[in-house]
Every structure is written in structure tokens, then in C-alpha cells.
Image (tube, rainbow, N blue to C red):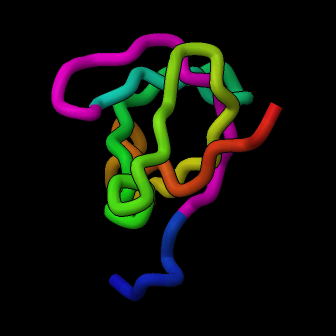
Amino acid sequence: MAKDDVIEVEGVVTKVLPSTLYRVKLDNGMEVLAHISGRMRHFFIKIVAGDRVKLEMSPYDLTKGRITYRYRD
């Protein structure tokens, strides 16, 4: 699978879980488990419940994703 074969979606963080995991409700109504990307960890970007985020998801597993961007308020 190439790096370009990802699905980008947006959603809202509903719950913050231990080990930098997050429960995210997508715009289409699905709820997925997401973790933070390495670049966001490197720059200490904090994510709290209620934040709007952009996710990358694999077409093979649509229940998990990677948070790549947190939108500003």
C-alpha cells in the first residue's frame, strides 16, 4: 500500500483515552479510535475533547485512524 492510499476525513474528538488514544466522531456519523501522528507528538500539540481534527484512515480498516491536524478555533 502506498502512502497516498489513505482516506482523509474530518471529525470531532468525543473522548480522550489513555496512551494518546482518542475516540473521534466523524462527519458521516461513524465513531473511530485514533492516535496522534508523530509530528504532532514532536511539537507537543495537545488535543482535548471537542477539538475538530483531520484523520487519515487506511481503506483496509475503517475503525482506526491517525490524527494529522487539529483545526484552530
Closer to us: 5 or 35: 35
Instruction: State the residue at coordinates (19%, 21%).
Output: 18
For residue 12, side relative to residue 32 (left or right): right
Position of residue 13 relative to residue 3, above or below, is: above
Instruction: State the residue at coordinates (28%, 17%).
Output: 17
Position of residue 49 relative to residue 67, above or below, is: above
Magenta segment, prevailing SS (helix, strand or loop): strand
Residue 45, horizontal then vertical, whole percent: 48, 45
Where is the C terminus found, in terms of image quarters? Answer: top right
For residue 61, side relative to residue 59 (left or right): left
Residue at the limit of the structure toward the left, as seen here: 19
Position of residue 39 relative to residue 69, above or below, is: below
> What's drawn in magenta, residue-wise?
7-20
Instruction: State the residue at coordinates (62%, 57%).
Output: 8
Instruction: State the residue at coordinates (52%, 56%).
Output: 68
Residue 7, horizontal then vertical, whole percent: 57, 60
Position of residue 62 relative to residue 27, above or below, is: below
Residue 40, horizontal then vertical, whole percent: 44, 56
How many numbered circles does the render carry? 0
Residue at the limit of the structure toward the front, as seen here: 44
Residue 13, horizontal then vertical, whole percent: 55, 22
> Hey, which quadrant is residue 64 in on the image?
top left
Residue at the limit of the structure toward the bottom, as seen here: 2
Closer to us: 20 or 62: 20
